[in-house]
Image: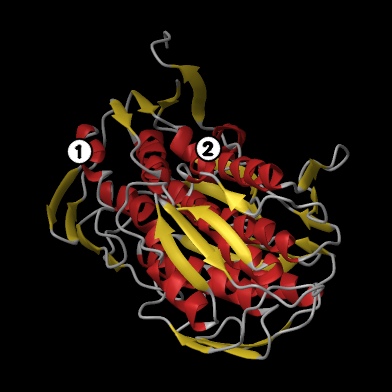
Amino acid sequence: MDQLLIRGGRPLEGEVSVSGAKNAALPELCAALLTAEPVTLHNVPRLHDVGTMARLLATMGVRVERDAQHPDRLHLDASALDRPEAPYELVKTMRAAILVLGPLLARFGQARVSLPGGCAIGSRPVDQHIKGLQAMGASISVEHGYILATAPGRPGGGRGGLRGARISTDMVTVTGTENLLMAAVLAEGETVLENAAQEPEIPDLAEMLIAMGARIEGHGTSRIRIQGVERLGGCSHRIVPDRIEAGTFLCAVVATGGDVLLRGARAEHLDAVIDRLREAGARIECGTEDGQGWIRVRQSGRPRAVSVRTSEYPAFPTDMQAQFMAVDCVAEGVAKVTETIFENRFMHVNELLRLGARIDVDGHTAIVQGVPRLSGATVMATDLRASASLVIAGLVAEGETRVDRIYHLDRGYDAMEAKLRGLGADIERVRAGSAA
């Protein structure tokens, strides 16, 4: 099993390109199920979860090919799909696989999807997905660990039998909004999604669907209106840059010190993170060049401790909580970190303590007392964003840090260690038990 070996204490300097967003790529791969025409996705990140989703689609009969000349492009063709099923063997490692449910129902009128697995960061129930699809006329049961759904369409039709409905979810759910949005584009009549999630990946998905012929208004707000169409066509779509990857690099620079330019980053998607990092003392500039966004971050000396509270977009994202905590671990002062989204998302705390951090947890709140320095040790990643926080802590710690179970990192970060090496970090991938 691979580990990351980090020799800390070096500031980060230079330029790094931000990859396409994992949280946009996964639903957009699923959106290819909605049409029998070819779909091309650009700026696709090279991630384990993307590979898993591609294999899942392939088991259904979708042709998935990575462009030999442009490795960041994927070509998808679901015209020969013959198995509307997502088996447990693939779904168990990735919760986002639930996103095939809406498209399969919408186009084929049937789906058999395993209940999802994924990171152990707390309960992420799919009941809101099911309730919304039932409101659109689907018949759904859960048997032997599988969601069985039907919505038979008209004979010879190009879509299933879903009907438009007004749906208000009991909570803000990103994947729920995406699943229902994809289902609604082929439903008969109008669908209105109330209490919709507003994360940037959702309007990006909506823009892809619009390019395929969907009729959508209000995406990016809490109320999305969809007029169903008979069928969708193919499209070519560029995936939005990964705001969480960009935020992770911003936190790494603020923790270690240095001067880094992020190419391809969208600052408007990171307002809450950038505001807090500026409070911590970072100098951050943003702009655009040749149609692409950029962010420059500079930090000298220790950052100041800044408290954060996670909430739905556009507030501070739960996916940045662990990385920001790593910054607070070496900051001057005391910070309070409050997690409101997932109940188990402080599992990285015990590993940060191994590096010399001072953190007390009381329920959903962590009190972080900054220390002048951390000390390298062997630590274990427990989930995707926790692994990123341990990498940041290792970059600033004295001596050697080994981060174990980095398959979590590979699920959501495209060549992270290579990008960090390009910025001057002393980091390498090694086999567990190998000599330094």
Tag 1's secondary structure? Answer: helix
419 shown above or below 433: below
314 shown above or below 51: below
Residue indicated by mark 1: 353
Q: Position of residue 122 (x, y in %)?
A: 29, 55
Q: Residues within 10 Å of mark 2 (few under 14, many from 20)?
A: some
Quarter assignment of residue 241: bottom right
Tag 2's secondary structure? Answer: helix
Direction top: furthest residue:
435
What amino acid is at disc 2? Answer: Asp
Q: Residue at x 65, y 78 (%)?
A: 161
Side of 420 relative to 207 (left or right): left
Q: Position of residue 337 (x, y in %)?
A: 24, 61
Q: Residues within 10 Å of mark 1 (few under 14, many from 20)?
A: some
Q: For this rendering, which residue is in front, 170 or 155?
A: 155
The number of numbered discs placed on residues in the rendered structure image is 2
Q: Residue at x 56, y 44 (%)?
A: 49
Comparing marks 1 and 2, which lies closer to the viewer? 2
Residue indicated by mark 2: 410
Residue 243 seen anywhere in this rendered image of the structure = no
CA–CA distance between discs 1 and 2? 23 Å
Q: Earlier in the sequence, mark 1 or mark 2?
A: 1
Q: Give the quarter of the figure containing the C terminus.
A: top left
Side of 88 relative to 341 (left or right): right
Quarter assignment of residue 285: bottom right
